[in-house]
Image (tube, rainbow, N blue to C red):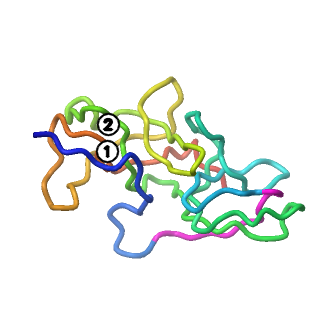
Amino acid sequence: MAQTGATATVARPGRRKVGAIVRQSPEGSSQTYPKGALLARVAASGIVMGSTAELQSTGLVGLAISSGQNLTANGLKNATYFAFEKGGAPIKLTFAVSSWTGTAHRGVAGALYMDTNGSVWVSSGGASTCGTILDAVDWDNGVPVADGDVNPVVYFVVADAAIAY
């Protein structure tokens, strides 16, 4: 019987012996993003929330550790975020798939998708890509993900070209 995971989970660093890299950068003005939102760097605007309801593949910096400050001028506060790392450091995110097939999904390109609540997950739909799914992560009960499982958590590597510093 197939197991079903959550539609989205809080991103975590994958396979690290030390904590996640946390960065702070000046926040763009009027930012109201929630904790966990996908953040991007926009020239002359600082760190802003990525677009919702579309696949994200460029200018990414990381995932928000705290909510946006909603200030009226750029750079008055710093956005604090779990930073994506160049060089292939994986993160753990839900892979939105109705039926996991290991042979088909390991190594597939994907993009990050965010809903209006700031929940972020990996999607393989569409032409936009920003990284690669390495493999599924065992379920919380220790059972390995099997073909037919729904919404597994995966190790996802954000491509260097998608990350902005």
Residue 60 is situated, as x and y percent measured from the top left of the image, at 61, 48
Q: Secondary structure at mark 1?
A: strand
Q: Which residues are magenta?
A: 20-30
Within-10-Å neighbours for mark 1: few <14, some 14–19, many 20+: some
Residue drawn at 81 percent across, 57 percent down: 30
Q: Is residue 13 left or right of residue 135?
A: right
Residue drawn at 37 percent across, 38 percent down: 96
Residue farthest to the top?
A: 127
Residue 150 is situated, as x and y percent measured from the top left of the image, at 26, 39
Q: Secondary structure at mark 2?
A: loop
**Figure quadrant of the N terminus:** top left
Earlier-in-chain disc, 1 versus 2: 2
Whether residue 89 appears in magenta in the rendering, the answer is no
Q: Amino acid at mark 1?
A: Leu
Residue farthest to the bottom?
A: 18
Residue farthest to the left?
A: 1
In this rendered view, identify the residue nearer to me: 72 or 16.
Answer: 72
Identify the image quadrant of residue 66: bottom right
Dot 1 and dot 2 residues touching (CB under 8 Å): yes
Q: Which of the numbered marks, if any, corresponds to residue 107?
A: 2
Residue drawn at 26 percent across, 47 percent down: 136
Identify the image quadrant of residue 140: bottom left
Q: Amino acid at mark 2?
A: Gly
Residue farthest to the right?
A: 73
- For label 1, the residue is 134
Q: Is residue 147 left or right of residue 39?
A: left
Residue drawn at 31 percent across, 45 percent down: 134
Residue 80 is situated, as x and y percent measured from the top left of the image, at 64, 69
